[in-house]
């Protein structure tokens, strides 16, 4: 097992006890489309997947990490509203959706394919549908020399992604703080909730 695998395994063990994000509830309330389909990009251990399914959504969760996918397959076994797959942002086939979540996951999209990844996300969202997710800023510790490639963006680049959206919330985080595993790093992220118009 590689060091990266060990890091993710430790992260998932901690993440299993975490509840869904409050902004996931907010995203569902904002969904003006008639489509009750949600995609959780980089679904991790499935906390948001669980909430979405309990809210009556057909949920497609994907993650590139095999441990995450195995945890979710076990967690959602027999749940007809949940479909989990091992996939990257670049290879996932995005169904039409009313909600797309990308919680701290687009950080790790392939930077050279980011434009296509975002186009796929934007195209799959129905008019009135909601995107809720995070983007890595250029001052983040992981923006360079991280053990896997990351996709840092400037504030202008993030805002430009939402030309065809109404931005409901936009928050910049720029601070030193611990990760969920207790390692202190500099966080520079942009969190966005937006409705497609």
Image (spheres, grey):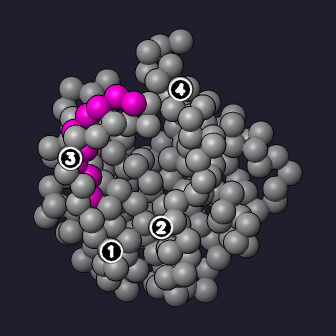
Q: Which residue is mark 3?
A: 175
| Label 1 Cα neighbours within 10 Å, binned few <14 / some 14-19 / many ≥20 | few
Rendered location of residue 163, percent (x, y): 24, 77
187 part of magenta stretch: yes
**Element class at badge 4:** helix
Magenta segment: does it hold 105?
no
Q: Residues within 10 Å of mark 2 (few under 14, many from 20)?
A: some
Tell me, yes or no, if residue 161 can be seen here.
Answer: no
Question: What range is drawn magenta here?
Answer: 182-190
Give the tally of numbered discs. Answer: 4
Between the C-alphas of marks 4 and 1, the distance is: 31 Å
Label located before the other in sequence (4 or 1): 4
- Give the residue at mark 1: 169
The location of residue 121, given as percent across then percent down, is 43, 63
C-alpha distance separating marks 4 and 2: 25 Å
Q: Which residue occupies 66% across, 62% down?
A: 51
Kindly report the secondary structure that dominates the magenta region of the rendered protein: strand
User: Viewer-proximal residue, 93 or 70?
Assistant: 70
Asked which secondary structure carries label 2, the reply is helix
């Amino acid at each position: 097992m590689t060091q990266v695998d060990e890091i993710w395994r430790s992260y998932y063990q901690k993440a299993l006890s975490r509840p869904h994000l409050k902004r996931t509830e907010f995203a569902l309330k904002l969904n003006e489309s008639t489509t009750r389909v949600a995609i959780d990009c980089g679904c991790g251990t499935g906390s948001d997947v669980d909430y979405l399914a309990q809210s009556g959504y057909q949920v497609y969760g994907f993650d590139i990490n095999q441990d995450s996918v195995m945890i979710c397959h076990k967690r959602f076994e027999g749940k007809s509203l949940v479909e989990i797959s091992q996939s990257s942002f670049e290879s996932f086939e995005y169904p039409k959706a009313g909600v797309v979540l990308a919680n701290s996951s687009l950080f790790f999209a392939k930077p050279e394919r980011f434009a296509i990844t975002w186009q796929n996300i934007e195209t799959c969202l129905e008019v009135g549908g909601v995107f809720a997710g995070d983007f890595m800023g250029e001052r983040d510790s992981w923006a360079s020399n991280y053990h896997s490639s990351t996709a840092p963006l400037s504030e202008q680049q993030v805002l430009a992604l939402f030309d065809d959206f109404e931005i409901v919330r936009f928050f910049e985080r720029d601070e030193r703080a611990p990760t969920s595993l207790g390692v202190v790093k500099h966080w520079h992220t942009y969190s966005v909730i937006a409705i497609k118009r």
